[in-house]
Image (spheres, rainbow, N blue to C red):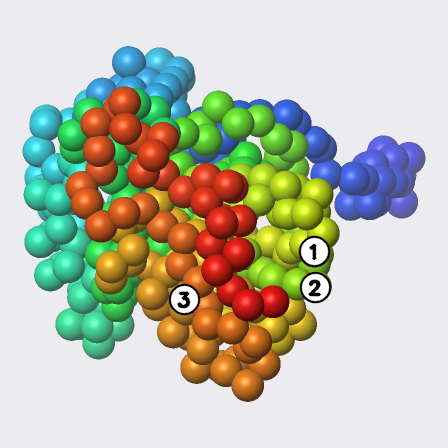
């Protein structure tokens, strides 16, 4: 073996054992990095949506990508969400891997017929012969002072639909990896991005491998009660755990990360340890995603529970005007007030 070959092998061995490179990024920047890396890794990946080209999107998640990759890979679409998703279906059937953006959560509703009737059903309808490797990105939730149609939490519609994978990252690391995993998937994936957390910064290890990005994660260990959150409400749960500790409560916090499929194993283990559970989400409580979570917990861990599963959610009204948002969105204080309704 030559000296060059020996040096090359040694360099590869060192690289294999090196700690993953850590960057500090906002969630928006992590999503941008994921899109950039996906475009570099696979020339079948294309990105389009309203204003995602030269402007870089309303939240600048696609900033710089159009300039770098050109209008054949990243471009602005017409203002027609049904057309955005409809063309993505055709592209995916033809072997392209489209990543499309619904500019705001409530803007996506014109596309729901395409999603429910075709995106979610194509593999089943064709007995597995036709795959739809497409990603729909949706900025969602409140907390930014958005007017009507600019703040909504419609995740229950999508998670209820068989055939869709639905995820919602709560930190920059998950934002990067869940989006990369979604783009690599052979099935359609909906990525709900918590818009009020876009500027929250955290560590990202791009080269981390061997992680199941559809599994829930215990972020804080506790023994009295487990709080279940996802997307924007994970920070609410963590803050409630901090405040609860001042009152003598030992609160466990789980980031669900994936809404569909649901990680029953991780959640059940925590519920059976703590014997009490509460789920937090911004959407209205009636028929909300928390109802499914509560039902699953009750069905699988009924004999371990010391109290009914609680749901801390938005009120059963449309998202209010910006000046009233603070009264609508779940807060750490509302979480602790709900826990006080139990008999301990």
- Earlier along the polypeptide chain: callout 2 or callout 3? 2
User: Which tag is nearer the camera, tag 3 or tag 1?
Assistant: 1
Q: Mark 2 and mark 1: span between their CA atoms?
A: 6 Å
Q: What residue does disc 3 label? A: 293
Q: Dot 1: what SS?
A: loop
In this view of the protein, which residue sits in the foreground, 340 or 164? 340
Question: Is 10 on the left or on the right of 279, as rendered?
Answer: right
Instruction: Specify whether residue 155 is in view.
Output: yes
**Above/below status of 260 relative to 71:** below
Q: What residue does disc 2 label? A: 223
Q: What residue does disc 1 label? A: 250
Q: Identify which residue is drawn at 61% across, 62% down.
A: 225
Q: Identify which residue is drawn at 64% across, 47% down.
A: 244
User: Which tag is nearer the camera, tag 2 or tag 3?
Assistant: 2
Q: Quadrant of residue 7?
A: top right
Q: Residue furthest bottom?
A: 303
Q: Locate residue 159, reporting x and y percent.
A: 30, 60
Count of numbered circles in the view: 3
- Earlier along the polypeptide chain: callout 2 or callout 1? 2
Q: Residues within 10 Å of mark 1 (few under 14, many from 20)?
A: some
Q: Locate residue 249, reporting x and y percent.
A: 68, 54
Q: Locate residue 243, reporting x and y percent.
A: 63, 41
**Image quadrant containing the C terminus:** bottom right
């Amino acid at each position: 073996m030559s000296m060059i070959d020996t040096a090359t092998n040694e360099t590869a061995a060192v690289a294999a054992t090196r700690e993953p490179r850590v960057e500090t990024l906002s969630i928006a920047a992590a999503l941008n990095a994921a899109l950039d890396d996906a475009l570099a890794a696979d020339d079948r990946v294309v990105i389009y949506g309203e204003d995602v080209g030269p402007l870089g999107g309303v939240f600048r998640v696609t900033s710089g990508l159009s300039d770098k990759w050109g209008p054949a890979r990243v471009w602005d679409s017409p203002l027609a969400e049904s057309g955005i998703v409809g063309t993505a279906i055709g592209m995916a059937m033809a072997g392209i891997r489209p990543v499309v953006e619904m500019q705001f959560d409530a803007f996506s509703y014109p596309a729901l017929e395409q999603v429910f009737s075709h995106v979610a059903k194509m593999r089943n309808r064709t007995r597995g012969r036709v795959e739809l490797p497409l990603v729909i990105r949706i900025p969602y939730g409140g907390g930014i002072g958005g007017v009507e149609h600019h703040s909504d939490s419609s995740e229950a519609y999508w998670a209820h639909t068989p055939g869709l994978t639905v995820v919602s990252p709560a930190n920059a690391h998950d934002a990067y990896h869940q989006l990369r995993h979604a783009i690599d998937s052979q099935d359609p994936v909906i990525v709900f991005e918590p818009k009020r957390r876009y500027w929250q910064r955290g560590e990202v290890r791009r080269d981390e491998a061997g992680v199941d990005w559809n599994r829930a994660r215990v972020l804080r260990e506790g023994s009295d009660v487990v709080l279940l959150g996802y997307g924007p409400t994970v920070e609410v749960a963590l803050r409630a755990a901090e405040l609860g500790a001042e009152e003598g409560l030992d609160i466990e916090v789980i980031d669900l990360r994936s809404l569909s499929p649901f990680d029953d194993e991780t959640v059940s283990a925590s519920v059976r340890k703590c014997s009490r559970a509460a789920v937090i989400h911004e959407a209205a409580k009636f028929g909300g995603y928390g109802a499914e979570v509560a039902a699953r917990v009750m069905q699988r861990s009924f004999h371990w529970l010391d109290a009914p599963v609680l749901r801390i959610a938005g009120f059963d009204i449309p998202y209010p005007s910006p000046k009233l948002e603070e009264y609508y969105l779940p807060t750490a204080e509302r979480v602790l007030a709900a826990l006080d309704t139990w008999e301990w």
